Image: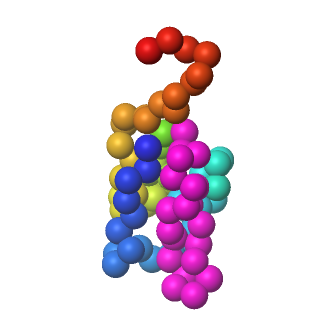
Amino acid sequence: MIVSIDQELCNSCGRGDDACPMDVIHMDQETDKPEIRFVDDCMTCYNCEIECALGLIYVDPSKIEKHQPWKMA
């Protein structure tokens, strides 16, 4: 799951935003910096982390699975 984006070092290229298939990352109109939204929709695909040329996006390899009522724990 996406954990962080280093806002201070970000050059606002938009590559992380463009790479996210789930629209978890959005460019803030006022700051022109990416921000994490809809974190629960993150698929842990690493596209944003891979596309960030500066290595400023961190995706944790663990994906929090949502409880499925039809599955027994």
Q: In this view, does 23 lie to the left or right of 49?
A: right
For the image, the number of numbered tags is 0
- Percent coordinates x, y for residue 44 in the rendering: 48, 39
Q: Residue at x 39, y 64 (%)?
A: 5
Residue 71 vs 20, above or below: the answer is: above
Question: Is residue 19 at all visible to an observer of this figure?
Answer: no
Quadrant that contains the N terminus: top left
Q: Residue at x 51, y 52 (%)?
A: 39
Q: Which residue lies furthest to the top in this view?
A: 72
Quarter of the image for residue 11 reads bottom left
Q: Is residue 29 magenta?
A: yes
**Nearer-the-camera pick, 58 or 3:** 3
- Percent coordinates x, y for residue 19 in the rendering: 60, 53
**Nearer-the-camera pick, 64 or 35:** 64
**Nearer-the-camera pick, 63 or 67:** 67
Q: Does the magenta stretch include residue 19?
A: no
Quarter of the image for residue 60 reads top left
Quadrant that contains the C terminus: top left
Q: Which residue lies furthest to the bottom in this view?
A: 30
Question: Is residue 56 at all visible to an observer of this figure?
Answer: yes
Q: Which residue is drawn at 57% across and 77% down?
A: 28
- Percent coordinates x, y for residue 33 in the rendering: 50, 77
- Percent coordinates x, y for residue 14 in the rendering: 57, 68
Snapshot colouring: rainbow
Q: Which residue is drawn at 37% across and 59% down?
A: 4
Q: What stretch is highlighted in magenta?
A: 24-43
